[in-house]
Image: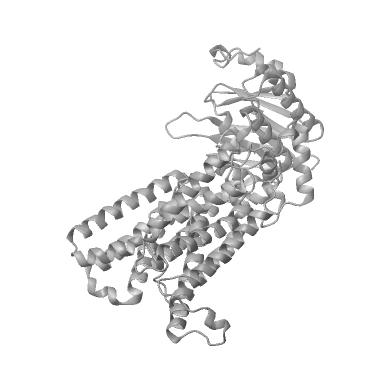
Amino acid sequence: MKLNRLPIWISLFALVIIGMFLSITLGSVAINWPAIFEGEGLLETEQIIVAELRLPRMIAALIGGAALALAGLLMQTLFRNPLAGPSVLGISSGSSLAVAFVTLGGGALVSHPFLLVGSSMVGALVVLAIIAYVANRFYDIASVLIVGVMLSFFTSALIGVLQSQATDQDLKAFVIWGFGSFGGLRLSQLPFFILPISFIVLASPFLSKQLNAYLLGAEHAQSLGIAVSRLRLISILMAGMLTAIVTAFCGPIAFIGLAGPHIARIVFRTSDHRLILPASLLVGGVLGLYCDVIARMPGSDSALPLNTVCSFIGAPIVIFLLIRQRKKSISW
Amino acid sequence: MVGAYLSLNAVSIEYPKRKAVVRHLNLSLPLGELTVLIGANGAGKSSLLRVAAGLQKPQSGVVCWNGKLLKEIALSQRARQLGALLRSQGAPPDMTLGEFIALGRIPHTGVFGKLTAADHRVAEQAAVRVGIANLYHESVHHLSDGELRKGQLAQLLAQDVPFLILDEPTTHLDPPSGHQFMNLLKELTLSGKGVLLTTHDLALAHQFADQMLLLHQGHLLRGSSEFILQQSLYTDFMGSGEKNM
């Protein structure tokens, strides 16, 4: 039976719009929205909160979530492994190690706003360069995956050493960064976040056809006219850059990149990248927006770690969809 | 495409720490013929097919398509001339059989891989021809191994190439399906396409082959099916319990 996918697209777009609305309107400070319609406008502090804090946060959640889901999809297709995600190549770990050096090595330096972002980006790019080098040299893609996982272990071990020597205050700063947050992005930083991600996202449809062929295996893809080595390198660079940018600005956020493509595949019941690629972007954006709203705990003074909320929400959704699908006897 | 052919010239295939699989092989495979390659496990049949399909570089020698060096033909062009059904395909992706068959149209699509109505028609016709049209909207994960094999052949048919290379295509098929499968390949050669395949089913090979090849200890023997089967009696290939006739 043919599946009518139009209602799914409409629902996803509706979820994005509602999520954006919630992200702007909800927070620890109540904004007097009716004042806009009554012609009075918002108070200056309210304007600052909306423009300087909530708007960048909303954009970061939407675009960051979408970027992570796209990175996850590329990794899952490339490694033909449903458990692959943006963190699998060790890129997040590279970021974490660089940030650990900065926060745990010299706490005073953290006061500079671009230092965390810069160090995180450098760490991610160093690992990405190693992975790209390995991917270019080894024909066997599983070897690249193993090198990525080993790099993760290695960097985690180094972080462990740094943590054992750190002061309580520095340790706390590092742990908080590790929680992940879409709230750290400032209005002035938005172009550095949006532009490179948009460029990669806009380039990604050019890979749809090649990734579809790659679903049949590297050798078969080649027999269908695909330059496999080039596809691997481009996909790794794209996924790596997306992960590096998001991790640099928002910290290591693991779950969206893993769950986003799964949810898209289950809901659309296909692996066709011409569908799954835009669908993963939307699902990632939805996950980013809603997880961030919940993590903020609107109306309360405290907040939850974003990574915790992502796992709390994402894991049951994936399990629920999977069980429902199995009951309907529809494979994915 | 009249007169087109696939040729291997002085091709040698070797693996480290192993005897050469193939030494200085010369072979010409014209269109309109079904060529069956037989040989014992590990004789190098699959390697030879991969080299012929341009998916593996030989240690020496060249492969030519229609007189041109295969390696100098762009991958996208090559995929419109040579199609391969190899054993290295992993688990099938999550999609319907129709979408799976339509992947064969990839070499004929534009940069975004958008399928036209004509592409869909070709995919549907391929499914009808292989006898799996009733499964067109089923998930490939619901198919048996044999049905999936037929789906892979339909995908290859949808690729619409003049020369088809298949590695043990009748594996997983029941005897009537295997017969039907070979019959279809024979029909393709009668319509002007070239086919090179490997099999361990000597009865099918004998029935359908126009030309047979026996790969044994790095050397290739060529001839009619009767001649090759006779020769194979003297090799360990037939003496190792793989005699199907």
By what rule are the colours in the image chosen?
Answer: one colour
**Vertical placement of B143 versus A177: above or below?**
above
Q: Is residue A77 left or right of residue A297?
A: right
Pick the front one: A295 or B57: A295
Tell me residue A64's x, y (percent): 48, 64
Give the x, y percent position of residue A297: 40, 64
Q: Nearer the viewer, residue B178 or A4?
A: A4
Q: Can see residue A229?
A: no
Find residue A43 and report its horizontal and vertical position in percent: 46, 85
> In the figure, residue B84 lies in which quadrant?
top right
Tell me what residue is drawn at x 42 percent, y 84 percent.
A45
Can residue A255 be seen here?
Answer: yes
Q: Is residue A300 above or below residue A130?
A: below
Residue located at (42% from left, 47% from top): A145
Q: Which part of the image, by quadrant, shows the C terminus of chain B?
A: top right
Quadrant location, the N terminus of chain B: top right
Image x and y of residue A280, in percent: 55, 56
**Vertical order, B169 against A181 (above or below):** above
Total marks placed:
0
Residue displayed at 36% across by 61% down: A305
**Residue occupying the point 53% across, 83% down:** A35
